[in-house]
Amino acid sequence: MSDGEPADGEPGTAEPVRCGVPAPGAVGLVAQAVARGVPDGGPPAGGGNEVEDPPRRGMAVTDVPVHLPFPPAAAAGQRPGGGPHGTPPAPRRAARPAAGRRVPRGDDRLREHHGPVLPGWVGVAVGALALVGCLAVFWRAGALPGVFEAALGATPRPYEGLRPTHWPPLAFLGVVALLALGGLGRGKTGHAWVLTLFGSYRGTVRRTGLNWVSPLLLRRRVDVRLRHWRSDPMPAVDAGGLALQVVVQVVWQVKDTARAVLAVEDHTEYLAEQVESAMARVLSQLPADAFHEDAPTLRDAEAVGDALTRMLAAETEVVGIDVYSAQPTRIEYAPEVAEAMRRRRVAAIDAKHRDTVLTSVVDAVDDTVHRLTSRGLVELDDYERKALVKDLTVAFYTGRSE
């Protein structure tokens, strides 16, 4: 029987009470520790197998979530107003844009659409009616020459002068005739008109034949035919830094006339400069020649052309140009390194030829010796086998060296 523990049936000494909650005795603490499998006052050692202490009679047990009394900063070991141990928080850095080359993007609102246009016969008819009206006014005023009166079969009228009532219809009919006849234009096959009004894009006319467009609109003719361009020898370098001279042929066509005219100062010059830029990026990724190994080189014109076409098409889409093909027609070394590279190429070809000849000679010697020994024609020891192999190798190699 422990001290402080009442015997069975005896009223024991009441345990001290603090704040209305009974405090367990020493025996109760030891029993709880043994039941949990840990020393007194220590944390649970059994992980998830510990036995929870049942609530005592007269005590209210309430689970309080950890995140309620503490903000997220405090739960992470920081105070609400700063970093760890009350240090001020570090200033947040602004996100920087990703580094690298950016493909230009045009104005999405600048897209080709049909412009205001009428058939040419409408302008001709309106202009003819306006001119007939002007002749009628002059005839009523008697100002029409006799030749015209006789040609038109009109009754001659005495000239009485142009009165103030004659000027308004003459002015109106004259303006109508100028607008009707001044707006006539001939649309050519393979060309288009880009219409602008005070610098604002108003549409594109691709119709051929006689058309009428308002004379107030500024017309810019654009060639929309399939075109090809062959460059002059342009400088470039390969993956090894060797100087090259490349000639490229590009097949292209204006797809969006609005962007080709208004999104760039000169779309043909822009295309030429982009060809040189894309060619320099593509050619710098591969060597011009691989002398002693089988590796991709710039001699693969199809692969190089495909890569150049894709890159050039992405660069010129912003100005309304559609690139169909960009093929290098000639890739040569620059004059300052051409002679050295020619000698190196000849040496590589010669070495490859010798290696091929030597391989065939060794195979022939091995086959000959194997046939002689397997059929029992000769019996050779190691010394004789080596001598025979040597003689056959020299004979076969000198006979095939040419």
Image: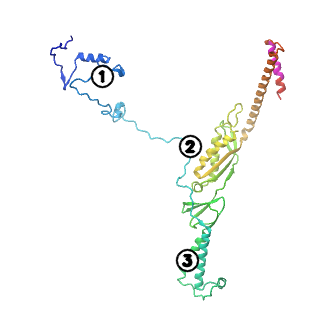
Relative horizontal placement of residue 202, taking residue 328 as reference (left or right): left
| Element type where label 1 sits in the image | loop
Q: Amino acid at mark 1?
A: Glu
- Separation of marks 1 and 3 at Cα, in angstroms: 108 Å
* Residue 294 percent coordinates (x, y): 69, 32
Q: In which quadrant will I find the C terminus? A: top right
Q: Which residue is mark 2?
A: 101
Q: Main secondary structure of the magenta part?
A: helix
Q: Along the polypeptide, which appears first: circle 1 or circle 3?
A: 1
Q: Which residue is mark 3?
A: 171
Q: Nearer the viewer, residue 124 or 108?
A: 124
In the image, residue 77 above or below residue 308: above
In the image, residue 185 above or below residue 268: below
Q: Which residues are magenta?
A: 383-395
The residue drawn where x is 59% and y is 71% is 180
Q: Along the polypeptide, which appears first: circle 3 or circle 2?
A: 2
Q: In which quadrant will I find the N terminus? A: top left
Q: Nearer the viewer, residue 96 or 300?
A: 300
Q: Is residue 99 visible?
A: yes
* Residue 254 percent coordinates (x, y): 62, 54
Q: Which label was assigned to residue 52?
A: 1
Relative horizontal placement of residue 345, taking residue 106 as reference (left or right): right
Mark nearest the camera among 2 and 1 is 1
Residue 174 falls within the magenta-colored stretch: no
Relative horizontal placement of residue 163, taking residue 379 as reference (left or right): left
Q: Amino acid at mark 3?
A: Ala
How many marks do you count on the picture? 3
Q: Along the polypeptide, which appears first: circle 2 or circle 1?
A: 1
